[in-house]
Structures are given as structure tokens and as C-alpha cells.
Amino acid sequence: MIEQMIEWYGKLKGLNYVILRYFNVCGASDDGEVGDSKRPSVLLVQNTVRGALGIEPFYLTCPSVDTPDKSPIEII
């Protein structure tokens, strides 16, 4: 609903906008038993933290999703 309100307001005021959907925030336990431990991870926050701490290079990855170009980006 919020995205629809932003779209409506953008049309009303002639504003360009971008909607970033943020989900699947998680970490993992040190032993890898709990949470995402894939390397590289598909999670932006996890990759950002690993890159910022110098643990490994930053990767911007995403899973294949059911969109025309298989990316999680939706152009409205």
C-alpha cells in the first residue's frame, strides 16, 4: 500500500522516485548452524558487513526471481 501511495504522490507532484525493497536481513552463528552461511551470500547487508570488515570482497549478488529479466528489480 505504501508503494502505491508513493506512486500516486509521485504522479501528483511530478516527482521521480525509487523504491528499494529491503528484506531477508540475517546473520549466521559462528559455527554456521543458524542463518545464512553461503559465500558469497545473496544478502546485501551480509555482503556489505563482510566487505566493510575486510573479511572478504564485497559482492552484489541476487537470486534469480520471476521477473522478465530474472532480477529482483521492478521498473514501474
Image: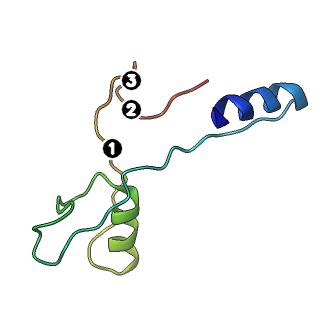
Check disc 3 and report its element: helix, strand or loop. Answer: loop
Q: Residue at x 34, y 65 (%)?
A: 46
Q: Position of residue 15 (x, y in %)?
A: 82, 35
Asked whether, in this view, residue 52 is left or right of residue 40, the answer is right
Tell me the tag on residue 62: 1
Q: Position of residue 41 (x, y in %)?
A: 25, 57
Residue at the disc numbered 3: 69
User: Would you call the spot at circle 1 few (<14 residues within 10 Å), some (14-19), or many (20 or more)?
Assistant: few
Q: Residue at x 38, y 72 (%)?
A: 49
Quadrant of the drawing holding the N terminus? top right
Cα gap from disc 2 to disc 3, whole angstroms = 6 Å
Check disc 2 and report its element: helix, strand or loop. Answer: loop
Of 54 and 64, the residue lying toward us: 64
Q: Position of residue 53 (x, y in %)?
A: 36, 81
The scheme the figure's colours follow is rainbow
Check disc 1 and report its element: helix, strand or loop. Answer: loop
